[in-house]
Image: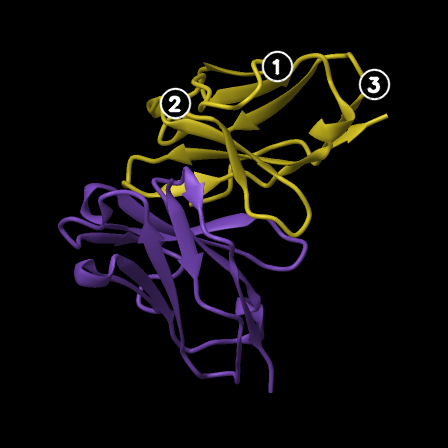
Amino acid sequence: QVQLVQSGAEVKKPGASVKVSCKASGYTFTSNTIHWVRQAPGQRLEWMGWINAGTGNTIYSQKFQGRVTIARDTSASTAYMELSSLGSEDTAVYYCARDLAYWGQGTLVTVSS
Amino acid sequence: QSALTQPASVSGSPGQSITISCTGTSSDVGGHNRVSWYQQNPGKAPKLMIYDVSKRPSGVSNRFSGSKSGNTASLTISGLQAEDEADYYCNSYTSSATWVFGGGTKVTVL
């Protein structure tokens, strides 16, 4: 069965960067896309970007352009999302999702001084 | 890209039907048949309920149905049950090859 397992919670200081991983199993990793979606406390889902796991091509939301990098390691069937220049407004649960159909468990990123 | 517009809350009694709307533009909802709906319970990851406007993934109750007219998509829950109480989000592909979510709708079963 399709499974996406994300890395653990992170606490970062303002201005720092965070990198979240998403390990896929149960399917051919390079046959699908991986999306990253975040949800601030009590707020709506917010789409950040996606990667074609086969080609490595990426597209980002305009809101995060220049601050987010999505990548993948096909040998490890793992996707990554790195967000830089963190501010308190980036405190959120970050999800990866295969084709926006199968979701990881979420990773809480807390930005606090 | 602005969020798609959903009502903040919808409520209904057990057994009733409710409909949640999701309004976008011709660049997203109106221009593509790639509208999805998600159910989210507190502290949990979203669950896909409808994709491609009206298709149901395996295992999703047929009480959930989706449709679209112009720039507005809709999710209908028939025979409302207590377990349907949750937040619901719509999502659409856009002409920029990006995706956009709605603001979310809280469904309350009275």
Which shade of the palette goes to chain B?
yellow
Q: Residue furthest left?
A: A55
Q: Residue furthest right?
A: B110
Q: Earlier in the sequence, mark 3 or mark 2?
A: 3
Marker disc for residue B13: 3
Q: Could you tell me residue A85's position as x and y percent?
A: 42, 78
Q: Residues within 10 Å of mark 2 (few under 14, many from 20)?
A: some
Q: Amino acid at mark 2?
A: Asp
Question: Which subunit holds the residue at mark 3?
Answer: B
Quarter where residue B98 is shown: top left
Q: Earlier in the sequence, mark 1 or mark 2?
A: 2
Which shade of the palette goes to chain A?
purple
Q: Could you tell me residue A90's position as x and y percent?
A: 52, 68
Nearest to viewer (mark 1 / mark 3): 1
Query: Does the image show residue A81?
Result: yes
Q: Amino acid at mark 1?
A: Arg
Q: CA distance from mark 1 to mark 3?
A: 15 Å
Please give left or right for residue B95 compared with residue B38 in the image. Answer: left
Residue identified by numbered label 1: B63
Query: Does the image show residue B25?
Result: no
Marker disc for residue B52: 2
Residue at the image position 42 percent from the left and 25 percent from the top: B51
Q: Could you tell me residue B9's position as x and y percent?
A: 73, 33
